[in-house]
Image (cartoon, grey):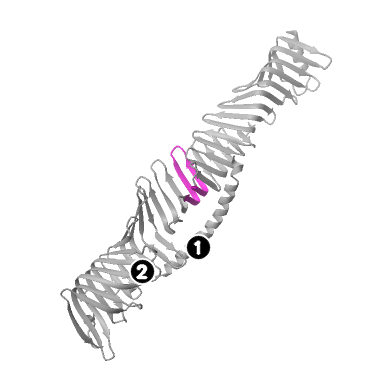
Amino acid sequence: MKYCFLFFFLLLNQAYSENVQIFHADLIQKNDHNNSISLIGNVHFKYKKYHLFCDEAIYHKKNNRLYGHGNVQLESEKNKIISKKIYIEDNFSHFKLSGGVVLSVGKIKLIADTINYDLRKKLLKAVNNVVVFFKKLKLTTNMLEYDFNRKKIFYKMNSIIYYDDYVVHSKEGFFSPDEEKAELKNGIKLISKNYTVYADILEYFFKKNKINFNDSALITQNDNSDNFIYVKKALFFIQKKIFLLEKYISIHYNEKIIKGKYLFFDEKKKYGFIRNFLLEDLKKKYFLMGGYGKFDFNNNSLILKKNPKIVRISKKNSFLIYSDILKMNFKKNSSYLIQAFSVESFFLNESIQGKSSVLNYESSNDYIQFDGNPIFWFQNQQITGKSIYISFQEKDEYFLKTIKIIKNAFYIEKINSKEFNQVEGDLMIGFFNEKNILEKISIQGNINSIIFLSSKENKLMNKSSCGMLSLYLDIEKKIRNISCAEQAYSELIPISEKTPNEFLFLSKFYWKEKEKPNAYKNFLVDKEIEKYRKENHLEQEEIEKIKQNKTKFL
C-alpha cells in the first residue's frame, strides 16, 4: 500500500495532474536514474472521470508522461477504448493508443491502428485501417476525426460507407450520429444493385432513408450499357423507392434523350410524371414535347399534356403535330401506338396542313388515321370527311403516298373568292407524286361534283353525278382532266355575275380557310429546338468532364 501512496504523492506534485490516482498495481518500482516509476500487473489509474487499465505502465516524472501496454482499456462512463499500447503526455490531456484499437461510444464502434485523443479539445483522430460501425452503417477510411463537442465524425481521405444495399465511396465528408446524417463531397461514387451514381456533393439521411444530391450527378446503369441520367439536383427516398430529379434532368436511354425540369418516379408503383418534357429519338429523328408528362410502366404508357407536340425536322423537310393530349402505348415487340386528342394543327413540309379531333398511329402500320371531322389543306385545296388516312412513301416518310377519306368525303379547290371546284362522295383516295404534290383523286359512291370551266367566250359550270370519278391535276394543282363512270349524269351550265351564289355550291360545301393552322407555331418550335441544342451542347461538356474524371471516384 505504501507504494500506491508514494505514486499518488508524486502525481500530486504535478500542477496539471492533481486529479490522477492509482487504484491498483501488483508491483511498483522506482527508477532514480531516469526519474520514472514502473507499474506491473493489473494496473488501474483514474484521471478525472477516466479509468485506465493495462498490464504494465511506466510513468516519467520529468516530462509527466505515461506509457502503458498489454490489454489497455480506457473507460469513461459509457465510452470505452481498448488497445495494445497507450501513450499519455501533455499533463494527461493527450492520449495516443495503438495496436488493434477499438473505441465504443454509445452505439458507435470504431476500429483503427492508431487513435490520438486531445482531452482539452475533446477531439479524437483515428489513423489507418479505420472502420466505424453505427447501427446498419459501416464506414471505412484511412483518416478520421471525431469531434465530441460537435458530435460529428469527419474524414479527409478515401472512404467507403456501407448501408443497406448501397455502397458509397467519397474523398471526404462527415457523419453526425445524433442526426444520423452524412454529408459527403469530392469524388462520390454511390453503387446500388442496378445503378451507380457519380457526384461531388451528397447528403445521406439514414434515419429517414433519404439521399440528397445538391449538385450535378451522373447516374449510370450497371449493365455496361451507354444508358445514363444526368441531373443537377436529385432526391432519393430509399425505403419508399421514390425518386425526385429536380432542376434539370437528362435521361439517355437506347438512343433516346429525355429532358425535363422536374421528374417524380415511384419505383414500387412504377409510375411518375415529368415537367417540361422533351424526348428526342436519335435513331428515328423525331421529338416529343409537352409541358407535363405522365408515365406508367405497368401499362407501358406515356401521356403528354399542356401543348404536347410531335416534331420531325430535317434540313429540307418537317412533320409537326400539335394537340391537347398525346398518348403513347409501348408494346413488347418494340412497336407502339400514338393517340392525339384535339389535334389543333398538323403540318407536313409547310405545304400540307390539317386538324382533327383524334389522331391514331400504330408503328406496325404504314398510315396515320385522323378521326372526328378532320380537315386537310394543300395550299388552295381542302379535303374533309369522317375519317382520313394518310400513308407515306417508303423512301421518305416526309412525303405522302396516298390520302384516303372515308364517309362524307369532300374535296374543294379554290379558284377565286367566289368559285370553287367541289366533289363529294362516300370514299375518296388521293395520290401524290414524289414531290408531295396531289396529282390524282379517285372518288366512289354517291358522287356529286361542281367543276368550273373557262373559255374565251364564257364561263361554264360542269355539274355532274356518278358512281365513280377520277380527277387528274396538273403541276399547278388545277384540274386538267375528269373521268366519270357508272350511271353518270353531267350538264354544262353557263354562269355569269347574276348567277345566284347558292347555285354555285353543293349543299354540304363549307370552305374553312379561317380554321387553317398558323405556320408561325413552327417558328416557335424551331426556337425551342434551337434552345434545346444549346443546352444539350453545354450538358455534354459537363457529362464528359464527369466521365473523364471517373477514375477519381475509384
Label 2, residues with CA under 10 Å away: few <14, some 14-19, many ≥20: many
The picture places residue 232, in percent across and down from the top left corner, at 53, 50
Give the quarter of the image for residue 287.
bottom left
Q: In this view, does 38 lie above or below 419?
A: above
Task: Check contact, mark 1 vs mark 2: CB within 8 A.
Answer: no
Disc ID at residue 530: 1
Q: Residue furthest right?
A: 33
| Nearer to us in this view, 56 or 350 | 350
Label 1, residues with CA under 10 Å away: few <14, some 14-19, many ≥20: few
Q: Which amino acid does label 1 sit on?
A: Glu
The picture places residue 330, in percent across and down from the top left corner, at 36, 50
- The answer to whether residue 177 is left or right of residue 36 is left
Q: Which of marks 1 and 2 is nearer the N terminus?
A: 2
Say what secondary structure mark 1 lies in.
helix
Q: What residue type is labelled 2?
A: Gln
Find out whether residue 322 is within the magenta segment. Answer: no
The picture places residue 7, in percent across and down from the top left corner, at 76, 14
Q: Is residue 119 above or below residue 323?
A: above
